Amino acid sequence: MHTLAQLKSGELSQIRRLQLTENLTEFPVEIFNLADTLEILDLSNNQLSSLPSDFGRLYRLKILFLTNNHFSQIPQVIADCIHLNTISFKANRISSIAEAVFPVATRWLILTDNQINKLPDCIGELAGLQKLMLAGNKLTELPATLAQCSRLQLLRISANQLTCLPDWLLQMPELAWLAFAGNPFSDSPNSTTSSAQKVSLSDIQLHEQLGEGASGVIYRAKWIKQPLPLQDAEQPIAVKLFKGHVTSDGYPADELQASLIAGSHPNLVQITGHIAEENQLALIMSLIPSTFYNLGLPPSLETCTRDTFAKGLQLTLANIGAIALSIADTMIHLHKKGLCHGDLYAHNILIDQDASVLLGDFGAATHFLSLPDEQIAAIQAFEVRAYGHLLDDLLRLCSDKTKDPHLFRQLSELKNSCSQVDITATPTFTEIIQQLRSFN
Protein backbone atom coordinates (compact mmCIF):
# COMPACT_ATOMS: atom_id res chain seq x y z
CA MET A 1 0.00 0.00 0.00
CA HIS A 2 1.28 3.44 -0.92
CA THR A 3 0.31 6.90 0.29
CA LEU A 4 -0.74 10.05 -1.52
CA ALA A 5 2.07 11.89 0.23
CA GLN A 6 4.62 9.47 -1.25
CA LEU A 7 3.12 9.95 -4.70
CA LYS A 8 3.18 13.76 -4.52
CA SER A 9 6.73 13.87 -3.17
CA GLY A 10 8.05 11.87 -6.12
CA GLU A 11 9.16 9.05 -3.84
CA LEU A 12 7.35 6.49 -6.01
CA SER A 13 9.12 7.36 -9.25
CA GLN A 14 9.73 4.39 -11.58
CA ILE A 15 7.38 1.98 -9.80
CA ARG A 16 5.44 -0.61 -11.81
CA ARG A 17 2.58 -1.06 -9.34
CA LEU A 18 0.69 1.64 -7.42
CA GLN A 19 -1.97 1.04 -4.76
CA LEU A 20 -3.74 3.98 -3.13
CA THR A 21 -6.65 3.85 -0.70
CA GLU A 22 -7.29 7.24 0.89
CA ASN A 23 -10.99 7.99 0.29
CA LEU A 24 -10.04 9.66 -2.96
CA THR A 25 -12.80 11.60 -4.70
CA GLU A 26 -10.63 12.76 -7.59
CA PHE A 27 -7.98 11.01 -9.65
CA PRO A 28 -4.51 12.18 -8.47
CA VAL A 29 -2.89 13.79 -11.52
CA GLU A 30 0.54 12.97 -10.09
CA ILE A 31 -0.07 9.39 -11.24
CA PHE A 32 0.72 10.57 -14.77
CA ASN A 33 4.31 11.16 -13.65
CA LEU A 34 4.61 7.36 -13.47
CA ALA A 35 3.41 6.81 -17.05
CA ASP A 36 6.75 5.49 -18.31
CA THR A 37 6.76 2.55 -15.86
CA LEU A 38 3.28 2.06 -14.37
CA GLU A 39 1.70 -1.27 -15.33
CA ILE A 40 -0.63 -2.02 -12.39
CA LEU A 41 -2.90 0.64 -10.88
CA ASP A 42 -5.07 -0.23 -7.88
CA LEU A 43 -7.39 2.55 -6.71
CA SER A 44 -9.90 0.26 -5.00
CA ASN A 45 -11.83 1.28 -1.89
CA ASN A 46 -12.03 4.98 -2.65
CA GLN A 47 -14.86 7.30 -3.70
CA LEU A 48 -13.96 7.84 -7.32
CA SER A 49 -16.70 8.30 -9.92
CA SER A 50 -14.72 9.37 -12.99
CA LEU A 51 -11.33 9.22 -14.68
CA PRO A 52 -9.56 12.10 -16.48
CA SER A 53 -10.09 12.45 -20.22
CA ASP A 54 -6.37 11.92 -20.88
CA PHE A 55 -6.24 8.65 -18.93
CA GLY A 56 -4.68 7.04 -22.00
CA ARG A 57 -1.40 8.76 -21.11
CA LEU A 58 -0.80 5.71 -18.92
CA TYR A 59 0.32 3.92 -22.06
CA ARG A 60 2.01 1.01 -20.25
CA LEU A 61 -0.97 0.20 -18.05
CA LYS A 62 -1.95 -3.49 -18.09
CA ILE A 63 -4.03 -3.96 -14.93
CA LEU A 64 -6.62 -1.59 -13.44
CA PHE A 65 -8.52 -2.18 -10.19
CA LEU A 66 -11.32 0.24 -9.31
CA THR A 67 -13.23 -2.05 -6.97
CA ASN A 68 -15.57 -0.49 -4.41
CA ASN A 69 -15.80 3.03 -5.77
CA HIS A 70 -18.73 5.18 -6.95
CA PHE A 71 -18.66 4.71 -10.72
CA SER A 72 -22.11 4.73 -12.33
CA GLN A 73 -20.67 3.94 -15.75
CA ILE A 74 -17.43 2.56 -17.14
CA PRO A 75 -15.32 5.49 -18.35
CA GLN A 76 -14.82 5.41 -22.11
CA VAL A 77 -11.24 6.54 -21.62
CA ILE A 78 -10.01 3.13 -20.46
CA ALA A 79 -10.24 2.01 -24.10
CA ASP A 80 -7.34 4.38 -24.81
CA CYS A 81 -5.00 2.13 -22.80
CA ILE A 82 -4.23 -0.34 -25.54
CA HIS A 83 -2.29 -2.76 -23.32
CA LEU A 84 -4.92 -2.88 -20.58
CA ASN A 85 -5.97 -6.53 -20.16
CA THR A 86 -7.27 -6.91 -16.59
CA ILE A 87 -10.06 -4.60 -15.40
CA SER A 88 -12.13 -4.55 -12.22
CA PHE A 89 -15.13 -2.36 -11.52
CA LYS A 90 -16.45 -4.73 -8.86
CA ALA A 91 -18.88 -3.27 -6.29
CA ASN A 92 -19.64 0.05 -7.94
CA ARG A 93 -22.96 1.53 -9.11
CA ILE A 94 -22.82 0.66 -12.79
CA SER A 95 -26.19 0.05 -14.47
CA SER A 96 -25.36 0.29 -18.17
CA ILE A 97 -22.27 -0.06 -20.33
CA ALA A 98 -21.58 1.87 -23.52
CA GLU A 99 -20.34 0.31 -26.73
CA ALA A 100 -16.62 0.30 -27.58
CA VAL A 101 -15.65 0.92 -23.97
CA PHE A 102 -13.31 -2.02 -23.38
CA PRO A 103 -9.71 -2.17 -24.62
CA VAL A 104 -9.31 -4.85 -27.27
CA ALA A 105 -6.59 -6.52 -25.16
CA THR A 106 -9.05 -7.31 -22.34
CA ARG A 107 -8.74 -10.88 -21.08
CA TRP A 108 -10.02 -10.61 -17.46
CA LEU A 109 -13.09 -8.45 -16.80
CA ILE A 110 -14.60 -8.13 -13.32
CA LEU A 111 -18.03 -6.46 -13.10
CA THR A 112 -19.34 -8.31 -10.05
CA ASP A 113 -21.85 -6.67 -7.70
CA ASN A 114 -23.22 -3.79 -9.76
CA GLN A 115 -26.64 -3.05 -11.26
CA ILE A 116 -25.90 -3.92 -14.87
CA ASN A 117 -29.03 -4.85 -16.82
CA LYS A 118 -27.47 -5.28 -20.25
CA LEU A 119 -24.06 -5.99 -21.73
CA PRO A 120 -22.96 -4.18 -24.89
CA ASP A 121 -22.63 -6.11 -28.13
CA CYS A 122 -19.04 -4.93 -28.36
CA ILE A 123 -18.06 -7.51 -25.78
CA GLY A 124 -17.91 -9.96 -28.67
CA GLU A 125 -14.94 -8.02 -30.04
CA LEU A 126 -12.77 -9.07 -27.10
CA ALA A 127 -11.13 -11.99 -28.88
CA GLY A 128 -8.74 -12.63 -25.99
CA LEU A 129 -11.33 -12.60 -23.20
CA GLN A 130 -10.67 -15.56 -20.87
CA LYS A 131 -12.37 -14.68 -17.60
CA LEU A 132 -15.66 -12.79 -17.19
CA MET A 133 -17.12 -12.07 -13.75
CA LEU A 134 -20.76 -10.90 -13.83
CA ALA A 135 -22.31 -12.26 -10.62
CA GLY A 136 -24.60 -9.98 -8.64
CA ASN A 137 -26.11 -7.84 -11.39
CA LYS A 138 -29.53 -7.48 -13.07
CA LEU A 139 -28.87 -9.17 -16.39
CA THR A 140 -31.92 -10.71 -18.05
CA GLU A 141 -30.00 -12.02 -21.07
CA LEU A 142 -26.52 -12.39 -22.48
CA PRO A 143 -25.62 -10.81 -25.83
CA ALA A 144 -25.26 -13.36 -28.60
CA THR A 145 -22.01 -11.67 -29.61
CA LEU A 146 -20.42 -13.19 -26.51
CA ALA A 147 -20.26 -16.43 -28.53
CA GLN A 148 -17.46 -14.79 -30.53
CA CYS A 149 -15.23 -14.79 -27.43
CA SER A 150 -13.83 -18.18 -28.33
CA ARG A 151 -11.11 -18.11 -25.66
CA LEU A 152 -13.54 -17.63 -22.75
CA GLN A 153 -12.73 -20.20 -20.08
CA LEU A 154 -14.36 -18.98 -16.87
CA LEU A 155 -17.78 -17.32 -16.64
CA ARG A 156 -19.69 -16.22 -13.53
CA ILE A 157 -23.32 -15.25 -14.21
CA SER A 158 -24.85 -16.23 -10.86
CA ALA A 159 -27.16 -13.92 -8.91
CA ASN A 160 -28.72 -12.24 -11.93
CA GLN A 161 -32.18 -12.30 -13.55
CA LEU A 162 -31.41 -14.56 -16.49
CA THR A 163 -34.39 -16.55 -17.74
CA CYS A 164 -32.39 -19.22 -19.58
CA LEU A 165 -28.99 -20.53 -20.51
CA PRO A 166 -28.53 -19.81 -24.22
CA ASP A 167 -27.59 -22.87 -26.26
CA TRP A 168 -24.68 -21.04 -27.91
CA LEU A 169 -23.08 -20.59 -24.50
CA LEU A 170 -22.97 -24.36 -24.05
CA GLN A 171 -21.05 -24.75 -27.30
CA MET A 172 -18.15 -22.44 -26.42
CA PRO A 173 -14.89 -24.18 -27.28
CA GLU A 174 -12.87 -23.46 -24.14
CA LEU A 175 -15.44 -22.79 -21.40
CA ALA A 176 -14.60 -24.95 -18.37
CA TRP A 177 -15.71 -23.12 -15.23
CA LEU A 178 -19.33 -21.93 -15.23
CA ALA A 179 -21.45 -20.68 -12.31
CA PHE A 180 -25.11 -19.75 -12.83
CA ALA A 181 -26.99 -20.26 -9.54
CA GLY A 182 -29.40 -17.62 -8.29
CA ASN A 183 -31.20 -16.97 -11.58
CA PRO A 184 -34.91 -17.56 -12.34
CA PHE A 185 -34.06 -20.53 -14.58
CA SER A 186 -31.76 -22.23 -12.05
CA ASP A 187 -33.73 -23.81 -9.25
CA SER A 188 -32.26 -24.07 -5.77
CA PRO A 189 -34.25 -26.79 -3.99
CA ASN A 190 -34.37 -27.05 -0.27
CA SER A 191 -31.91 -29.65 0.94
CA THR A 192 -34.58 -31.54 2.85
CA THR A 193 -32.68 -34.82 2.59
CA SER A 194 -29.53 -33.46 4.21
CA SER A 195 -28.47 -34.95 7.52
CA ALA A 196 -26.98 -31.61 8.53
CA GLN A 197 -29.53 -30.17 10.92
CA LYS A 198 -30.28 -26.52 11.49
CA VAL A 199 -28.82 -25.10 14.69
CA SER A 200 -28.37 -21.70 16.30
CA LEU A 201 -25.24 -19.58 16.37
CA SER A 202 -25.64 -19.50 20.14
CA ASP A 203 -25.12 -23.29 20.21
CA ILE A 204 -21.45 -22.96 19.33
CA GLN A 205 -18.40 -21.08 20.54
CA LEU A 206 -15.97 -19.67 18.01
CA HIS A 207 -12.24 -19.89 18.54
CA GLU A 208 -9.34 -18.83 16.33
CA GLN A 209 -9.73 -18.05 12.64
CA LEU A 210 -8.49 -20.84 10.38
CA GLY A 211 -8.95 -19.23 6.99
CA GLU A 212 -10.88 -16.79 4.86
CA GLY A 213 -12.19 -16.93 1.30
CA ALA A 214 -14.35 -14.85 -0.99
CA SER A 215 -17.59 -16.00 0.64
CA GLY A 216 -16.76 -16.44 4.30
CA VAL A 217 -14.46 -16.84 7.27
CA ILE A 218 -13.70 -20.24 8.82
CA TYR A 219 -13.15 -20.63 12.56
CA ARG A 220 -12.26 -23.48 14.85
CA ALA A 221 -15.24 -23.97 17.18
CA LYS A 222 -16.85 -26.22 19.76
CA TRP A 223 -20.35 -27.00 20.93
CA ILE A 224 -21.50 -25.13 24.01
CA LYS A 225 -24.98 -26.67 24.08
CA GLN A 226 -26.13 -30.22 23.65
CA PRO A 227 -24.83 -31.22 20.19
CA LEU A 228 -26.83 -32.88 17.48
CA PRO A 229 -27.58 -36.59 17.92
CA LEU A 230 -24.60 -38.90 17.31
CA GLN A 231 -22.15 -36.02 17.65
CA ASP A 232 -19.48 -35.75 20.29
CA ALA A 233 -19.66 -32.49 22.23
CA GLU A 234 -15.89 -32.58 22.71
CA GLN A 235 -15.06 -33.26 19.08
CA PRO A 236 -13.60 -30.09 17.48
CA ILE A 237 -15.58 -28.59 14.64
CA ALA A 238 -15.10 -25.79 12.14
CA VAL A 239 -17.64 -23.13 11.28
CA LYS A 240 -17.80 -21.13 8.08
CA LEU A 241 -19.55 -17.81 8.63
CA PHE A 242 -20.74 -16.38 5.32
CA LYS A 243 -20.18 -12.70 4.70
CA GLY A 244 -21.76 -10.14 2.39
CA HIS A 245 -24.83 -10.33 0.18
CA VAL A 246 -23.02 -11.50 -2.94
CA THR A 247 -19.56 -12.86 -3.78
CA SER A 248 -17.59 -13.23 -6.98
CA ASP A 249 -19.34 -16.60 -7.44
CA GLY A 250 -22.90 -15.71 -6.39
CA TYR A 251 -25.17 -15.71 -3.35
CA PRO A 252 -23.87 -17.22 -0.09
CA ALA A 253 -27.29 -18.84 0.40
CA ASP A 254 -26.79 -20.82 -2.81
CA GLU A 255 -23.38 -22.00 -1.61
CA LEU A 256 -24.92 -23.13 1.66
CA GLN A 257 -27.67 -25.04 -0.15
CA ALA A 258 -25.21 -26.68 -2.53
CA SER A 259 -23.00 -27.76 0.37
CA LEU A 260 -25.98 -29.41 2.04
CA ILE A 261 -27.23 -31.06 -1.16
CA ALA A 262 -23.75 -32.48 -1.84
CA GLY A 263 -24.21 -34.73 1.18
CA SER A 264 -21.71 -37.29 2.38
CA HIS A 265 -18.75 -38.63 0.41
CA PRO A 266 -15.26 -39.72 1.53
CA ASN A 267 -13.68 -36.90 -0.51
CA LEU A 268 -15.94 -34.14 0.80
CA VAL A 269 -15.68 -32.35 4.13
CA GLN A 270 -18.49 -33.67 6.32
CA ILE A 271 -21.16 -31.00 6.92
CA THR A 272 -22.79 -31.64 10.28
CA GLY A 273 -25.02 -28.61 10.71
CA HIS A 274 -26.01 -25.25 9.34
CA ILE A 275 -27.17 -21.89 10.61
CA ALA A 276 -29.78 -19.83 8.79
CA GLU A 277 -30.57 -16.83 10.98
CA GLU A 278 -31.78 -13.44 9.80
CA ASN A 279 -28.36 -11.84 9.72
CA GLN A 280 -26.08 -14.86 9.55
CA LEU A 281 -25.65 -17.96 7.41
CA ALA A 282 -23.10 -20.58 8.38
CA LEU A 283 -21.99 -24.15 7.83
CA ILE A 284 -20.78 -26.40 10.63
CA MET A 285 -18.35 -29.07 9.51
CA SER A 286 -15.87 -31.60 10.78
CA LEU A 287 -12.49 -30.10 11.54
CA ILE A 288 -10.06 -31.04 8.79
CA PRO A 289 -6.94 -32.80 10.14
CA SER A 290 -3.81 -30.65 10.14
CA THR A 291 -2.10 -33.21 7.89
CA PHE A 292 -4.05 -31.85 4.90
CA TYR A 293 -2.76 -28.94 2.82
CA ASN A 294 -3.83 -27.06 -0.31
CA LEU A 295 -2.88 -28.88 -3.47
CA GLY A 296 -2.77 -25.62 -5.43
CA LEU A 297 -2.88 -21.87 -5.11
CA PRO A 298 -5.35 -19.54 -6.91
CA PRO A 299 -4.58 -18.15 -10.36
CA SER A 300 -2.34 -15.11 -10.53
CA LEU A 301 -2.75 -11.98 -12.60
CA GLU A 302 -0.44 -13.57 -15.14
CA THR A 303 -2.03 -17.05 -15.30
CA CYS A 304 -5.59 -15.63 -15.27
CA THR A 305 -7.61 -18.88 -15.35
CA ARG A 306 -4.97 -21.41 -14.40
CA ASP A 307 -3.80 -22.28 -10.91
CA THR A 308 -0.39 -21.58 -9.44
CA PHE A 309 1.52 -23.93 -7.16
CA ALA A 310 3.89 -23.69 -4.24
CA LYS A 311 7.51 -23.53 -5.30
CA GLY A 312 9.10 -26.96 -5.25
CA LEU A 313 5.85 -28.92 -5.08
CA GLN A 314 6.20 -32.30 -6.77
CA LEU A 315 3.90 -35.29 -7.12
CA THR A 316 4.62 -38.87 -8.04
CA LEU A 317 2.70 -40.66 -10.77
CA ALA A 318 1.08 -42.74 -8.04
CA ASN A 319 -0.04 -39.54 -6.29
CA ILE A 320 -1.44 -38.11 -9.51
CA GLY A 321 -3.32 -41.31 -10.32
CA ALA A 322 -4.81 -41.47 -6.83
CA ILE A 323 -5.88 -37.82 -6.90
CA ALA A 324 -7.36 -38.19 -10.39
CA LEU A 325 -9.37 -41.25 -9.36
CA SER A 326 -10.68 -39.63 -6.17
CA ILE A 327 -11.74 -36.42 -7.89
CA ALA A 328 -13.49 -38.28 -10.72
CA ASP A 329 -15.42 -40.36 -8.19
CA THR A 330 -16.38 -37.21 -6.28
CA MET A 331 -17.64 -35.54 -9.45
CA ILE A 332 -19.83 -38.55 -10.23
CA HIS A 333 -21.31 -38.23 -6.75
CA LEU A 334 -22.01 -34.50 -7.20
CA HIS A 335 -23.55 -34.94 -10.65
CA LYS A 336 -25.85 -37.65 -9.31
CA LYS A 337 -26.98 -35.09 -6.74
CA GLY A 338 -27.75 -32.66 -9.58
CA LEU A 339 -24.82 -30.37 -8.80
CA CYS A 340 -22.05 -29.01 -10.95
CA HIS A 341 -19.12 -27.79 -8.88
CA GLY A 342 -18.26 -24.90 -11.19
CA ASP A 343 -14.82 -24.34 -9.69
CA LEU A 344 -12.89 -27.59 -10.08
CA TYR A 345 -9.38 -26.37 -9.36
CA ALA A 346 -6.36 -27.61 -7.44
CA HIS A 347 -6.69 -24.65 -5.07
CA ASN A 348 -10.04 -26.07 -3.94
CA ILE A 349 -8.52 -29.48 -3.20
CA LEU A 350 -6.81 -30.52 0.01
CA ILE A 351 -4.46 -33.51 0.07
CA ASP A 352 -2.24 -35.26 2.59
CA GLN A 353 0.99 -37.21 2.22
CA ASP A 354 -0.94 -40.32 1.20
CA ALA A 355 -2.72 -38.38 -1.60
CA SER A 356 -6.03 -38.57 0.24
CA VAL A 357 -8.33 -35.89 -1.16
CA LEU A 358 -10.91 -33.42 0.12
CA LEU A 359 -12.71 -31.29 -2.46
CA GLY A 360 -14.17 -28.07 -1.09
CA ASP A 361 -15.60 -24.63 -1.89
CA PHE A 362 -19.12 -24.83 -3.31
CA GLY A 363 -19.40 -21.10 -3.94
CA ALA A 364 -19.74 -21.63 -7.70
CA ALA A 365 -21.86 -24.78 -7.47
CA THR A 366 -25.23 -24.88 -9.21
CA HIS A 367 -28.19 -27.25 -9.11
CA PHE A 368 -28.96 -28.19 -12.70
CA LEU A 369 -31.73 -30.81 -12.70
CA SER A 370 -34.37 -28.35 -13.93
CA LEU A 371 -32.47 -27.83 -17.20
CA PRO A 372 -33.00 -29.76 -20.47
CA ASP A 373 -31.01 -32.98 -20.81
CA GLU A 374 -28.86 -31.53 -23.60
CA GLN A 375 -27.81 -28.62 -21.40
CA ILE A 376 -27.10 -30.89 -18.44
CA ALA A 377 -24.82 -32.99 -20.64
CA ALA A 378 -22.95 -29.87 -21.79
CA ILE A 379 -22.51 -28.58 -18.25
CA GLN A 380 -21.15 -31.93 -17.12
CA ALA A 381 -18.78 -31.88 -20.09
CA PHE A 382 -17.51 -28.46 -18.99
CA GLU A 383 -16.63 -30.06 -15.67
CA VAL A 384 -14.73 -32.78 -17.54
CA ARG A 385 -12.84 -30.03 -19.39
CA ALA A 386 -11.92 -28.42 -16.06
CA TYR A 387 -10.82 -31.85 -14.87
CA GLY A 388 -8.57 -32.09 -17.93
CA HIS A 389 -6.93 -28.79 -17.00
CA LEU A 390 -6.45 -30.09 -13.46
CA LEU A 391 -4.75 -33.21 -14.82
CA ASP A 392 -2.54 -31.01 -16.99
CA ASP A 393 -1.44 -29.03 -13.94
CA LEU A 394 -0.71 -32.17 -11.93
CA LEU A 395 1.28 -33.83 -14.72
CA ARG A 396 3.46 -30.73 -14.91
CA LEU A 397 4.37 -31.38 -11.25
CA CYS A 398 5.29 -35.03 -11.86
CA SER A 399 8.61 -35.99 -10.30
CA ASP A 400 9.01 -39.49 -11.73
CA LYS A 401 7.52 -39.55 -15.23
CA THR A 402 10.56 -41.42 -16.55
CA LYS A 403 9.95 -44.19 -14.02
CA ASP A 404 6.85 -45.30 -15.92
CA PRO A 405 6.65 -43.43 -19.23
CA HIS A 406 3.76 -45.64 -20.36
CA LEU A 407 1.58 -44.57 -17.43
CA PHE A 408 2.59 -40.94 -17.91
CA ARG A 409 1.57 -41.17 -21.57
CA GLN A 410 -1.76 -42.76 -20.64
CA LEU A 411 -2.54 -39.97 -18.18
CA SER A 412 -1.48 -37.38 -20.76
CA GLU A 413 -3.79 -38.90 -23.37
CA LEU A 414 -6.65 -38.88 -20.85
CA LYS A 415 -5.93 -35.23 -20.14
CA ASN A 416 -6.10 -34.43 -23.83
CA SER A 417 -9.38 -36.27 -24.31
CA CYS A 418 -10.93 -34.31 -21.43
CA SER A 419 -9.74 -30.92 -22.67
CA GLN A 420 -10.74 -31.08 -26.32
CA VAL A 421 -12.83 -28.44 -28.06
CA ASP A 422 -15.68 -30.78 -29.02
CA ILE A 423 -17.41 -31.44 -25.70
CA THR A 424 -19.62 -34.11 -27.26
CA ALA A 425 -16.47 -36.20 -27.68
CA THR A 426 -15.19 -35.85 -24.11
CA PRO A 427 -15.45 -38.89 -21.85
CA THR A 428 -17.87 -38.98 -18.92
CA PHE A 429 -16.52 -39.23 -15.40
CA THR A 430 -17.69 -42.85 -15.29
CA GLU A 431 -15.62 -43.56 -18.40
CA ILE A 432 -12.70 -41.66 -16.89
CA ILE A 433 -12.74 -43.89 -13.83
CA GLN A 434 -12.84 -46.99 -16.02
CA GLN A 435 -9.81 -45.74 -17.92
CA LEU A 436 -7.88 -44.86 -14.77
CA ARG A 437 -8.50 -48.30 -13.30
CA SER A 438 -7.30 -49.94 -16.49
CA PHE A 439 -3.97 -48.07 -16.47
CA ASN A 440 -0.87 -49.94 -15.40
Image (cartoon, rainbow, N blue to C red):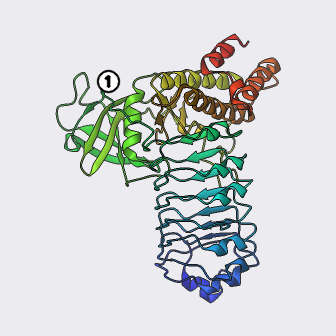
From where the camera sits, is residue 361 visible?
yes
Task: Identify whether 197 is placed above or below 81.
Answer: above
Q: 10 or 197, which is in the foreground?
A: 197
SS label for mark 1: loop
- Count of numbered marks: 1
Q: 172 or 318, which is in the foreground?
A: 172
> Where residue 8 appears, x then y in whole percent?
60, 88
The C terminus: image quadrant: top right
> Where residue 143 appears, x then y in whole percent?
61, 52
Task: Identify whether 175 is placed above or below 322.
Answer: below
The N terminus: image quadrant: bottom right
From where the camera sits, is residue 304 visible?
no
Quarter location, residue 108: bottom right
Task: Identify whether 163 is placed above or below 61.
Answer: above
**Callout 1: few (<14), some (14-19), or many (20+) C-alpha neighbours within 10 Å?**
few
Instruction: Decide if residue 268 is on the left or right side of residue 426.
Output: left
Q: 123 or 114, which is in the foreground?
A: 123
Instruction: Decide if residue 80 is on the left or right side of residue 97.
Output: right
- The amino acid at mark 1 is Thr
Instruction: Decide if residue 104 is on the left or right side of residue 432.
Output: right
> Where residue 57 appears, x then y in whole percent?
72, 80
Quarter location, residue 325: top right
Taking the spot 60% from the left edge, 40% from the top edge, the residue there is 177
Taking the spot 64% from the left edge, 52% from the top edge, the residue there is 300
Taking the spot 17% from the left edge, 31% from the top edge, the residue there is 226
Residue of label 1: 193
> Where residue 161 appears, x then y in whole percent?
45, 49
**Residue sticking out furthest to the bottom:** 9
